[in-house]
Image: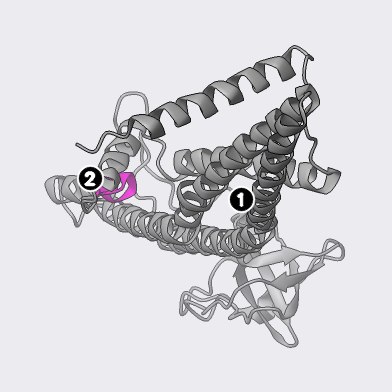
Amino acid sequence: MDFNVKKLASDAGIFFTRAVQFTEEKFGQAERTELDAHFENLLTRADSTKNWTEKILRQTEVLLQPNPSARVEEFLYEKLDRKIPSRVTNGELLGQYMTEAANDFGPSSPYGQTLIKVGETQKRLGIAERDFIHSSSINFLTPLRNFLEGDWRTISKERRILQNRRLDLDACKARLKKAKAAEAKASAEHELRVAQTEFDRQAEVTRLLLEGISSTHVNHLRCLHEFAEAQATYYAQCYQYMVDLQKQLGRFPSTFVGNADGISPPLSTSPPAATLPLLQAVSPNPADGTLNPSEVKPPSSGTRKAKVLYDYEAADSSELALKADELITVYSLPGMDPDWLIGERGNKKGKVPVTYLELLS
């Protein structure tokens, strides 16, 4: 082993000198070289960036994976540089259970059919969630981690070196003040010039790294836009899946009405006389099962304008097909399902789903 005693002694002496200088500064017994205001602002900005990046990173991880055990497992796989195993989302697992239950209860029964439809939607929601988590991890979390584990470590290292250079410079200034003999002063002045040069060089290196925080903010801004876009896409998918599910469930007839004894009471084949005029206004044409637009009369008051949010294909002639961004007139009739309105566009009219509209004042 190459054991250099002189170098070890020199390093120990430098460390001792820095420790003495640092201690005397803390007790106000020694002067310290202050950095300029711009440099101090850069340091403050860098520390703030590091702290908030850590908080945003941790909370985003919690948002994407609320299970702490799963987060620890993923962290260990990353540190071991091993591929993280694919994990089934809760939505996919729920959808699988619903499908299996439907097969057990009877897929052709009303309950079984509904379980299958809802289960398929849950699976689609789970897949969308997995895609969102994967996209956010790559496009948002990874750049934040790269900054903390790469650029920030480099900045911290150079800041420690700058701190040591400053302590050496101030120690040289103190020795020059204490020097009495001409030879001692000359030696102290030479050491001061060398220390000043090293300090200035290190200050410039550190300053350039700190100014690079602005580029980091620009990069993180781009990543934040991608995260927000991925989140918007995910929620739009979820919304569309649920709207589709509502449409599917709305077409299943309610053939069973339970009571406290578990016995289905007989269903009346005709509505009460008092509600018959209201139902006739929105009921299908008995000849073909469709809504007859000529028989639907708008109320004297209560019509509103609505903006169409999404394209909608009419399921039958009782519904009105919609195009995104168009304006239509809508109104409700007594006895109608609250999830639907009557929509009019020119001489065409029909039922339209409320979830596809933005009602205007």
Whole-percent x, y for residue 331 in the image: 74, 65
Q: Is residue 171 above or below residue 94?
A: above
In which quarter of the view is residue 341 placed? bottom right
Whole-percent x, y for residue 227 in the image: 54, 59
Q: Is residue 45 left or right of residue 245?
A: right
Q: Which residue is mark 1?
A: 273
Q: Label 1 sits on what residue type?
A: Ala
Question: Which residue sits at x=72%, y=81%?
Answer: 326
* Res 252 seen here: no
Q: Which mark is residue 80?
A: 2
Q: Which residues are magenta?
A: 87-94
Mark 1 or mark 2: which is in front?
A: 2
The earlier-in-sequence mark between 1 and 2 is: 2
Q: Is residue 105 left or right of residue 79?
A: left
Circle 1 sits in a helix, a strand or a loop, which is it?
A: loop
**Nearer-the-camera pick, 236 or 160:** 160
Question: Which residue sits at x=36%, y=41%?
Answer: 266
